[in-house]
Amino acid sequence: MSKKPAATSPATSPSPIHATVDFDLPGKQHGHLMVPYSYNLGGWANLLVPITVIKNGDGPTALASGGNHGDEYPGQIAIMKLCRNLEPSHVRGRLILIPSLNFPAAKASTRLSPLDGMNLNRAFPGKADGSVTSIIAHYLTTVLFPMADIVIDIHTGGRSMDFVPCATMHLVPDLKQRATMTAGVEAWNTDISFVYADVAGSGLLPVEAENQGKIVVTTEMGGGEPVPSGVHTITQVGLSNVLRHFGVLTGEPVTRQGLGLPPTRWVQALSRDDYRFAPESGVFEALVPLGADVATGQTVAQIHFLERPDREPVPIIAPTSGVLLATRGPALVAQGDCVACIAHDVDLASLK
Ligand code: CA
């Protein structure tokens, strides 16, 4: 019987990406991750993903990224501002900033990469010899995450969903890691802090970073293509405060209490039933404002049928009481689209 060849570990395959920045150099550098790829008029082409590294003395390393999904812009703008505005004197340790992780998708305002059709947030751990998206995931897995103590990945609902702006995290099994992540999420100072489950596949960026023991803070900062000023402010101010909280940026972090605000409301949606999917294709109408409390059995939205005005719309019902944390973004829905997320209050002590 022949022995099955061992699968190549991502960690043992060198990345084909060349970084034009030196991660060990003190000071501030703007550069690129050069990802080799080919297209019909470019045999030896490279995709240039912008990256900024700021290093000053001893301290933790934080990696902050946006544009994991290309059509989610608040984080991309917040990180571009840090790239321009921060100087080495503002940093203790090292800050690695990548505004647009899935750069081709960000330029096209798409969730998936237009180069290979892949969802970067389902591509981890990635492959050194894969397509562009897979190569980027592999580089994060094998080069950037091992350097980092803290990993911040800023999401929104993109063009598909609209969220109450919130900082988010997974319930990682390691209680020390979980407590540090909880404190990091709270440092974003959002009204709601959200513990989420992965209901749509595997291969997520935060899971790979968490499995490497990193402190991972993520967000869902609203949704849609626009970047409204209120959402942007929450994103920008929160990001800097989280970096101060972890000591990567100088200055004292502020707390909600210090701002005269009530404690954040911790909610979770860990059951598949907390995520509602369209039973049929049609036109989506929300019946409850985003962020509102809903009761068990309440109709929170409905789907209409353009070709059948005589037909009653199909209701989307909250199976349990909770807060309507997210709803479908575009009016048109296809069968199977996620159209609502209902989250439930959770005792913070149970998270620690
Ligand atoms: Ca997203």
Image (cartoon, helix red, strand yellow):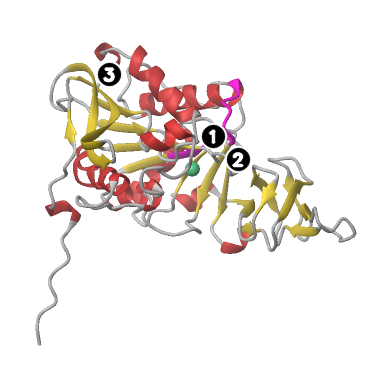
| Label 3 Cα neighbours within 10 Å, binned few <14 / some 14-19 / many ≥20 | many
Amino acid at pointer 3: Val
Answer above or below: position of 14 versus 28. Answer: below
Q: Single out the residue that lies furthest toward the right.
A: 310
Please give the range of residues in magenta: 218-229
Amino acid at pointer 2: Phe
Q: Which residue is mark 1?
A: 221
Q: Is residue 260 among what the camera can see? A: no
Image quarter of residue 83: top left
N-terminal of the two: label 2 or label 3? 3
Q: Which residue is mark 3?
A: 91
Q: Which residue is mark 2?
A: 163
Circle 2 SS class: strand
Q: Look at the numbered discs 2 and 1 and tell me whether their residues touch, using CB distance below 8 Å.
A: yes
Identify the residue at image location x=40%, y=39%.
68
Of 170 and 81, the residue lying toward us:
81
